[in-house]
Image: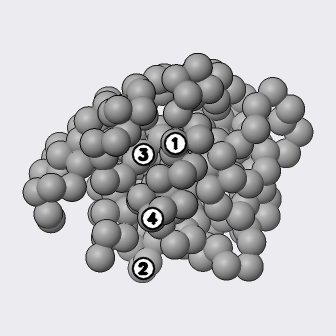
Amino acid sequence: MNKEIIVGVLALQGDFFEHQRILSRMGVASMQVRNKSDLDKCSALIIPGGESTTMANLLSRADLAFKIKKRVKKGMLFYGTCAGAILAAKKVIGENRFKPLALIDVDIKRNAYGRQADSFETEIEVSGKKINGIFIRAPVISRAGKKVEVLARVDNNPVLVKHKNVLLGTFHPESDDEIFVHELFLAMFK
C-alpha cells in the first residue's frame, strides 16, 4: 500500500472510530474529516453508518457536501456504509429533509428492514468470499442503475454496489472487524 494514501473518515457523527480501527489494523493511514481542509489532505473518503439526517445537516453546516461531490467527480475514492450509502445515493425514497449527494445511480430506502429491534446478521458472499453482514436499521437499495455493479445481495436486494470510484454498502463490516470490504475499497486505487 502506498504510504502517501490517507483515507479520511467523516467524523461528524456515527461509527467513524470503527472504520479507523479497521484501517489501522490494515496498516493504512487515516484521519478524521470534520471540515474542508481535512478533506483536502485525503486520498479517499469513508462516510460511516450513523443517522443520515443528522449527518446531512452537519455536512451542510460544515459546507462539505459540495466539496465531497467535486472531489468524487474528479476521482477521489468514496465508500459509504449504511447512512453513508444513504447520503451518497441519487435518490432517497420518501426523504424530503435533505438532498443526497448523488454520487452513484441508486435509489435507497432508509430503515427498510425496520427499527433497531429488527437489526440482523447474515452471511453474504462477496467476490467468492463469505463474510458476516451486520444490518442495523439498514437501508435497502431498491434500484441500481445500469452501470452500477452489484457485488452482493441479501434477499435479492443489492447490499454492496460499485460504480467507478464509489462503493456503497448497506451493512456494517467495521462492526465485526471484517476487513474484506475495506480491502475491496482500497484495491480501487489500482
- Per the image, label 2 sits on a secondary structure element best described as loop
Q: Quadrant for residue 155, please give it.
A: bottom right
Q: Which residue is mark 4?
A: 75
Give the residue drawn at x 43%, y 77%: 127
Q: Which residue is mark 1?
A: 67
Q: CA distance from mark 1 to mark 3?
A: 14 Å
Q: CA distance from mark 2 to mark 4?
A: 27 Å
Which one is closest to the eye, mark 3 or mark 4?
4
Q: Are marks 3 and 4 in contact (CB under 8 Å)?
A: no
Relative depth, front residue between 21 and 90: 90
Q: Quadrant for residue 181, please give it.
A: bottom left
Label count reads 4
Q: Position of residue 126 (x, y in %)?
A: 46, 71
Q: Which residue is mark 3?
A: 46
- Label 2 vs 4, first from the N-terminus: 4
The amino acid sitting under disc 3 is Ile
Q: Which residue is mark 2?
A: 128
Give the residue drawn at x 68%, y 26%: 53
Give the residue drawn at x 71%, y 42%: 100
Of the 4 image quadrants, the one containing the N terminus is: bottom left
